[in-house]
Image: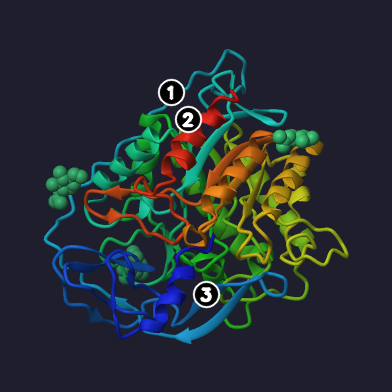
Amino acid sequence: MKGKLLVGSAIAATAAAQQTLYGQCGGIGWTGATNCVAGAACTSYNAYYYQCIPGATTAVTTTKATTTPVTTTKTTTKVTTTPVTTTKTTTKVTTTPVTTTKTTTTKTTTPVTTTKTTTGVSGSCPTTFVSTSGKEFRLAGQKFYYAGSNAYFIPMYGPNDTGDMDAALDAFKSSGLKVLRTWGFADFSGPQQSYVTVFQNWTTVPPVIQTTQEWGLPRLDYVVAGAEARGIKLIIPFVNNWADYGGIDLYVNKVVGSGGTHDNFYTNTQIKTIYKNYIAAVVARYKNSPAIMAWELANEIRCAGTNLGASSSCNAAVLTSWASEMSAYIKSLDPCHLVSVGDEGFFNIAGNSDYVYNGGAGVDNEALTALSTIDFGTFHMYPNSWGETYDWGNKWITDHAAIADKHNKPMVLEEYGVPRSSGLRDTYMAQYHATVLNSSIAGDMFWQFGTTVPNWGQSYDDGYSIFPADADWNTLVPGWAAQMAAKN
Ligand SMILES: *[C@@H]1O[C@H](CO)[C@@H](O)[C@H](O)[C@H]1NC(C)=O
Ligand SMILES: *[C@@H]1O[C@H](CO)[C@@H](O)[C@H](O)[C@H]1NC(C)=O
Ligand SMILES: *[C@@H]1O[C@H](CO)[C@@H](O)[C@H](O)[C@H]1NC(C)=O
């Protein structure tokens, strides 16, 4: 999911207006209102997203962009021709001083405890780790069909983040959801900004991995330890196809520079080394943690990205070859955790006129799923953004269940959603759930989990978020989680 900018582009027209409570009010690429309505303060959530949250209104100062000056306003459109319509605008980033009275509590990094219950057999893996058996997952020797969700923002909370991370994980746990997908990347170039999570500092090349800095990987440590304490399993992608949190375009801009194309990421030797080094640093931290369900190569790989397009030589074979190399690399470091791709599930059927079936994005879900070092398939689903009907979503699910059947591997519907504003969310989510239940789909993870935490307040609402206050919460979240759990 490209996420937040879907809403951002719609609001951008009202640049002079005051932003509403919980609306976006700044961040890289933001061109809309930067002042909040009375009673709300514009607060930096991360470099890409500032939100109006309840509190004293604060003055917003404007400073120059600290990353790439060219940013984008993204509108999601039918993907038949171009998957993402990119309107380039040069904007300044407004940086809020974040003049809250809150101070950050001292971080004590909770070490991730290791509960290795390896059996006597040399090379066997702990049963507390999720494993696969044919098309199913296994956990502690039992079937593990699950409902989970995405909440990319948990490592990105602002001031006093640990209380917020705990609150979000508590809410996730009590909803009955079992697997959480959250971002394991935060690539950034420029000076450290207040409360901005940065895992790789790209001011220099190669980037500096923030292994000990307060706003670096210790924050991911806290999420992993918190998930472990609650029995939540995590799917952690290592890079974003999109420019949010840096992403593949940042790797290419920094290493290749002018003339680089998005797909240099998949072939450039220096980039591949940098990416592998980052993987090695993250995997080493949590190699023994049962909280990790799977390492994921990327969020939504494609030949093209947000700012950079694809070269003419990019195709599905390039991405499959890259996925093969990188997944084998992860397995060489950590043979006991599962590895997935995180692709949107596009097929590569020659001659098909539909973009999501004809390999146009450079993705071949079947070939990726079939790789020996990939443990399960992944696919995403946004019918309205992809120029498909909501009914079509049921076919997209059964098309992927057929890949699970054919290759005898689990398949996870890893992101999907129907916008709340469509008025059709209840209807179609119920259909999709029925289709998932009556298929070999092993896991289901809607986009995305909405939550309200003490300091940050309400999580970002991109129109797809499902919050406890929503009328359909009980059906779509705890009710659905119980239905999936009943398959076990
Ligand atoms: C941090 O959050 C916790 C609860 O989440 C709260 O008790 C505490 O007062 C907060 N500290 C600050 C400095 O805001
Ligand atoms: C990145 O490193 C530079 C020094 O090379 C430093 O000035 C900057 O503050 C760092 N940024 C972050 C986000 O740590
Ligand atoms: C369940 O799936 C099977 C095919 O796997 C299909 O024949 C059947 O009609 C489906 N049942 C429902 C209720 O959708």
**Residue shown at 57%/52% (left/top)?**
416
Q: Nearer the viewer, residue 413 or 18?
A: 18
- Classify residue 361 by image quadrant: bottom right
Apparent side of residue 347 relative to residue 39 in the rendered image (left or right): right
Task: Look at label 3 and name its amino acid.
Answer: Lys
**Residue shown at 39%/77% (left/top)?**
30
Q: Residues within 10 Å of mark 2 (few under 14, many from 20)?
A: many
Q: CA distance from mark 3 to mark 2?
A: 37 Å
Task: Look at label 1 and name its amino acid.
Answer: Thr
Please name the residue that numbered disc 2 is placed on. 290
Q: Judging from the image, what secondary structure is the residue with disc 3 in? A: strand
How far from the left and from the top, in percent, is residue 229? 36, 30
Quadrant hosting ligand 3: top right
Q: Of callouts 1 and 3, which one flags the residue occurring earlier in the amino acid sequence?
A: 3
Apparent side of residue 415 relative to residue 9 in the rendered image (left or right): right
- Classify residue 112 by image quadrant: top left
Please name the residue that numbered disc 1 is placed on. 115
- Classify residue 332 by image quadrant: top right
Q: CA distance from mark 1 to mark 2?
A: 7 Å
Please name the residue that numbered disc 3 is placed on. 74
